[in-house]
Image (cartoon, rainbow, N blue to C red):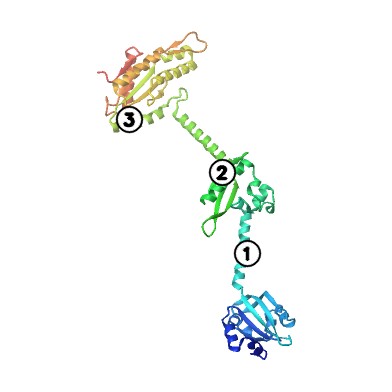
């Protein structure tokens, strides 16, 4: 050690001083009056390496250290940056002058704390905070952060814009000061529940045509206790309106599809199944009957003397008569029967799970219903009466028949009814 070190050593004892300085966790440098490093411990040597060999060390370490030597002042926790073997170090320095008996500065003692890592961590945290704050303010949701007393801790830009209130006028106040009483009461119940059970909750509010999707998220402390809440509120009015328009469009498209399907399957005049649609259903019903071993009845009905009606009253009146005839036989049908217009004045009826004798009874009821039906038309005095001929066949009476063959059998039975004088029923079950 240099000439002034014995004076310092005398305070502690030489070997005791060395031992003490080598085991402390802080870096220690002792300089002479000119700032030359007279002593440095292992901690500071590890940090500064070769820089310890430079004269006037304190000048190289930073001009802020000079007042200790020049003016005899004490410095505390001054941050300096110095180059080291592992890069730049950030150190907190405290320094005190060493005085002789005449109170003349003969050197200085400097204590260094390496805060490089903590400072880097702080800077990283500040940078992360800026990024998070940027995201926070860029979010479309209005976001409140509140504590268990409903005090606003932070808000983002969207809240300021939506409420037209600066953040500094909201932070520290009760969150419910900024909402109508009815809204506040509802929100208060929800936030209290989240504080209690720690379960996030989302819900949609509608107010005066404005739709808001709200979510309440719990924020826990290290013990798992909910101590804060993040409340987000997103304006989804445009989305809800778009979804409403989409639903309406889908509904209209479905109605259009159903209408088109109905037009494709329906006889335009009577509203019954047209021939194509009836045949499709009949094929399916016939297959089902054969799989289940049940019977199926088929009726063909033909309006008697229809040409005479057209010639007497005109084709428009004839169309009206066909409509009335279709309605009369349809009223006799059961809910699971189905009727179609087969062509012209000829109609066909399918009776699922119905034996021949029961099919004949239904045909007789139809015949009677048509006979009793009174048709009244404009520009014609009194009602018009019509009759029809009915042919009946059943699947079990001709089990090997195809759909076309069954229809031919029913058609043949209908012509037999006409041959017998019309206004009657003829069934293939009769021998």
Q: Callout 2 environment at 10 Å: few (<14), some (14 to 19), or many (20+)? A: few
Judge left or right: residue 155 versus residue 334.
right
Which badge, 3 or 2, is on the more N-terminal residue? 2
Residue sticking out furthest to the top? 381
User: Looking at the picture, does residue 147 appear above or below residue 346?
Assistant: below
Q: Which residue is mark 3?
A: 286
x and y, in percent, of residue 271 in the image = 46, 24
Q: Is residue 87 visible?
A: yes
Image disc number at residue 126: 1
x and y, in percent, of residue 124 in the image = 60, 66
Q: Residue at x 63, y 78 (%)?
A: 112
Q: Nearer the viewer, mark 3 or mark 2?
A: 2
Q: Marks 1/2: CA distance?
A: 35 Å
Judge left or right: residue 54 versus residue 316.
right
Which badge, 1 or 3, is on the more N-terminal residue? 1
x and y, in percent, of residue 144 in the image = 61, 51
């Amino acid at each position: 050690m240099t000439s002034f070190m014995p004076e310092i050593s005398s305070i502690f004892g030489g070997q005791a001083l060395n031992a003490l300085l080598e085991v402390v966790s802080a870096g220690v440098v002792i300089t002479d009056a000119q700032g030359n490093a007279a002593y440095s411990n292992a901690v500071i040597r590890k940090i500064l390496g070769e820089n310890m060999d430079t004269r006037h060390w304190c000048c190289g370490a930073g001009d802020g250290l000079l007042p200790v030597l020049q003016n005899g002042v004490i410095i505390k926790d001054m941050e300096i940056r110095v180059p080291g073997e592992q890069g730049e170090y950030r150190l907190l320095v405290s320094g005190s002058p060493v005085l002789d008996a005449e109170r003349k500065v003969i050197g200085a003692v400097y204590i260094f704390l390496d805060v490089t890592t903590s400072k880097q961590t702080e800077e990283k945290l500040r940078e992360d905070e800026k990024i998070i704050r940027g995201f926070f303010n860029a979010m479309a949701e209005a976001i409140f952060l509140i504590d268990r007393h409903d005090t606003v801790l932070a808000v983002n830009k969207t809240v300021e814009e939506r409420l037209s209130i600066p953040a500094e006028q909201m932070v520290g106040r009760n969150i419910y000061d900024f909402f109508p009483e009815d809204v506040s009461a509802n929100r208060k119940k929800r936030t209290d529940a989240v504080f209690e059970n720690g379960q996030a909750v989302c819900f949609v509010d509608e107010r005066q045509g404005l739709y808001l999707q709200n979510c309440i998220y719990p924020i826990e402390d290290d013990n798992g206790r909910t101590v804060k809440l993040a409340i987000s509120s997103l304006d989804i009015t445009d989305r809800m309106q778009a979804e409403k328009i989409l639903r309406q469009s889908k509904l209209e498209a479905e109605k259009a599809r159903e209408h088109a399907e109905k037009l494709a399957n329906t006889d335009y005049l009577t509203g019954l199944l047209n021939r194509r649609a009836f045949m499709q259903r009949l094929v399916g019903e016939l297959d089902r009957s054969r799989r289940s071993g049940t019977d199926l009845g088929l009726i063909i009905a033909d309006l008697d003397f229809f040409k005479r009606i057209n010639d007497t009253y005109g084709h428009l009146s004839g169309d009206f008569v066909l409509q009335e005839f279709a309605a009369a036989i349809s009223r006799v049908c059961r809910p699971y029967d189905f009727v179609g217009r087969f062509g012209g004045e000829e109609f066909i009826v399918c009776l699922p799970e119905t034996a021949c004798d029961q099919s004949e009874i239904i045909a007789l009821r139809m015949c009677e219903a048509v006979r009793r039906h009174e048709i009244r038309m404009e520009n014609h005095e009194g009602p018009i009466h019509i009759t029809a001929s009915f042919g009946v066949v059943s699947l079990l009476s001709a089990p090997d028949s195809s759909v076309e063959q069954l229809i031919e059998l029913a058609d043949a039975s209908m012509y037999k009814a006409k041959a017998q004088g019309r206004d009657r029923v003829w069934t293939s079950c009769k021998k």
